[in-house]
Amino acid sequence: MSVHADEIRLDLALPAAVPIATLIPPIADILAAEHGHPGGPTRYQLSCPGQTALDGSTTLAQRGIRDGAVLILTRSSTDIPPPQFDDTAEAVSSSLATAARPWTRHAARVTGALAALWLASVGAVLLTRQAVCDSDARPVGTSIAAVAGCIALTGATVAHRGFRDGTTAQSLGLLAIGFAAVAGLLAVPGGPAAPNALLAATAAAVTAVLVPRLTRCDTPLFTAVAGFALASAAAALAATLITVPVAAIGAMYVVVSLALIAASPPISILLAGLSPRLTDDESADTLPAKAIRANAWLTALIGAFSTTAACGAVAVAMCPAGGHRVVGVAFATLTGAVLLAQARSHRDMPKSVMLVANGTATLSAALVAAVVAFRPPIAWLGATTAMLTTAAFVVPVVQLSPVAHRGLGLLERLALAALVPLACWICGLYGTARGLNLP
């Protein structure tokens, strides 16, 4: 006979003289083992289509159910009564076991990966410091970083291809990218300066492109890292070739990055191969895969460009050009506000989290730069910190009306429009135009 559970169908041979209550647990075990049907402490019941549940104390023969019949397995509407214990210690132990979140192998792998990333990052920072301070140790430090990057890249490949461990593969891939950047930073004599940053960013970008190709762990994480590294390499190249203040490069990159964030949806659609209409050699069956690929591209692009915008705004706030600290702080504040405002446009958690994280980091840099530059009274500093902390708790839970949403959209556009003249001011374009003495 056939047993249906949700969308699953089982063809089973069931004994006719065994009570129905005895047949239900093996059927549930088969569903959980072969079809991944959710198990756990749930009370099930069998019934015929369109009829009430069968009495568990009766048999199939007694109910007149013969070969070829169709049965439906459903969850009972009656909850399982809680277990009763005579011993208080057993009751306490059972309650704790129910409420506690068990330590799983996945949790252990994630914790170990985070610990490894932290320890390797600390080691890379100390290695860089030691090599920069001691010129004799620089070649040794470069070799150590390069070898560590190769080992991490090999480990990531083995972890994902051999053991299907995506967490370890991603962690080792990030370590490979980081050590490649350290090796590139130390390979250039002198510095640290723009040429060191150029080689470091280039090495990181190349490694970020190689990691998903070698490991077959194609995630938006490495695409975002590659995009950020390429943008950093372009900024370092500009600083190497021409004498431009850091704040000017940062302002330019903020404007370009915010424009690219706005253009990310059509870019992701183009990269995924989606089209408004199907061609002759394209079927509708490929659309779901392409849609998922487009969403992954969009996540990577938003992550890369929002991080680039945040870093550019931090550079403007911390390294103001021409002593215009007020302009730098205002520019960073507007950039952070725009990034936070754009987070409300996305329903996908990774995109919103990246925009919120980069926007918060930018506002933090603006606050630090303002405090260092203007040295406000301690009362003003405390009040500002309290207001920002309160806003972080209140804003996410506030339900806005459609009119308020439209008003926020207008404010976001005004902030974007204000960033362009501020960027021109920071880059010195107004002073250059004033010095042209045009008729």
Image (cartoon, rainbow, N blue to C red):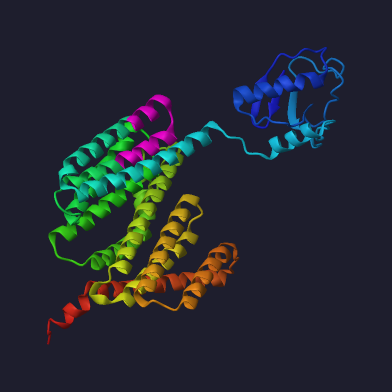
Is residue 126 depicted above or below 90 in this figure? below
Task: Magenta stretch: give its range.
Answer: 155-177
Residue at 47% x, 54% y is: 353
Q: Is residue 61 positioned above or below 232 on the image?
A: above
Residue 211 in view, yes or no: yes
Q: Is residue 221 above or below residue 372?
A: above
Pick the residue in front: 192 or 184: 192
Q: Residue furthest bottom?
A: 439
Magenta segment main secondary structure:
helix
Residue occupying the point 20% across, 41% down? 142
- Left or right of residue 184: residue 312: right
Q: Is 161 one of the magenta-colored residues?
A: yes
From the viewer's perspective, is residue 199 above or below residue 160?
A: below
In the rendered image, residue 88, in percent from the top left (x then y), is placed at 81, 34
309 sits to left or right of 33: left
Which residue shows up at 35% across the image and 27% down it?
158
Whether residue 208 is visible to the viewer of this picture, yes or no, is: no
The quarter holding residue 104 reads: top right
Q: Position of residue 220 (x, y in %)?
A: 39, 44
Identify the image quadrant of residue 231.
bottom left
The residue drawn where x is 56% and y is 62% is 396
Q: Quadrant of residue 45?
A: top right
200 lies left or right of 283: left
Query: Considering the image in quadrants, where does the N terminus appear?
Result: top right
- Counting from the top left corner in percent of width and height, residue 282 is at 38, 38
Left or right side of 348 for 270: left
Horizontal and vertical percent for residue 137? 18, 43
Quadrant (top left, top right, bottom left, bottom right) of the C terminus: bottom left
Q: Nearer the viewer, residue 277 or 49?
A: 49
